Amino acid sequence: MSATLDRLKELGLTLPPAAAPVANYVGFQRSGNLVVISGQLPFGANGQIDPAHKGKVGAAVSPEAAAEAARHCALNVLAQLRAAAGNLDDAVVSCLRLGGFINTAPGFSAVAGVMNGASDLMVQVLGERGRHARSTIGVAELPLDAVVEVEGMFEVR
């Protein structure tokens, strides 16, 4: 069994299948030892975005719900990583970077706390291999009215 999948199970999570792209792009691109993961939306286990994870944080969506959406995004990033690398244990050296896009209402600037939902999950699941550089920005709109989108870059073997 996979130690990484065991950690997910301990957190009450299961890794979903890698989501199919919703437009003209690929879910990941591998070049040598780098894997770049396209922006992942907060699709749940049923393949849908929970209505609580749609809209603008600071308006209809609470910061706590947005952080939970970021956690779902990170789980989907890990699903793409598994599709690219084959497994999440021996094949993954480290998470190099996460980028977060937060669908914000005017005046909402606490985007770092929202993105912590993704960052915290990455470290909980991958341990020290999950520590990463990060950028987080507030945006006016996201695909499918998602409150968060997260992309990643990983070093793999």
Image (cartoon, helix red, strand yellow):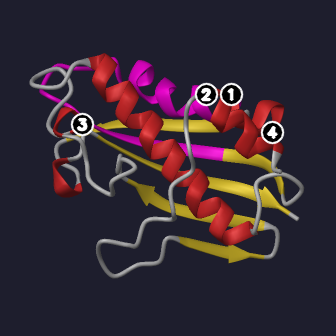
Residue in view at x 75 percent, y 69 percent: 86
Query: Which mark is in front, 4 or 2?
Result: 2
Residue in view at x 40 percent, y 50 percent: 45
The residues bearing labels 1 and 2 have C-alpha atoms spaced at a distance of 9 Å
Residue in view at x 71 percent, y 55 percent: 154
Query: Which mark is in front, 1 or 2?
Result: 2
Please name the residue that numbered disc 1 is placed on: 124
**In the rendered view, would you say 152 is above or below 22?**
above
**In the rendered view, would you say 6 is above or below 112?**
below
Q: Are marks 4 and 3 in contact (CB under 8 Å)?
A: no
The residues bearing labels 4 and 2 have C-alpha atoms spaced at a distance of 17 Å
The residues bearing labels 3 and 2 have C-alpha atoms spaced at a distance of 20 Å
Magenta region includes residue 127:
no
Q: Position of residue 51 (x, y in %)?
A: 16, 39
Query: Which mark is in front, 4 or 3?
Result: 3
Please name the residue that numbered disc 3 is placed on: 53
The residues bearing labels 1 and 3 have C-alpha atoms spaced at a distance of 22 Å
Q: Which residues are magenta?
A: 97-123
Residue 33 shown left or right of residue 9 in the figure: right
Q: Amino acid at mark 3?
A: His
Q: What SS does tag 1 mark?
A: helix
The tag earlier along the polypeptide, 4 or 2, is 2
The tag earlier along the polypeptide, 3 or 2, is 2
Q: Amino acid at mark 2?
A: Leu
Query: Which mark is in front, 3 or 2?
Result: 2
Q: Position of residue 151 (x, y in %)?
A: 50, 52
The tag earlier along the polypeptide, 4 or 3, is 3
Q: Amino acid at mark 4?
A: Arg
Please name the residue that numbered disc 2 is placed on: 11
**In the rendered view, would you say 73 is above or below 7?**
below
The residues bearing labels 4 and 1 have C-alpha atoms spaced at a distance of 10 Å
Please name the residue that numbered disc 4 is placed on: 129
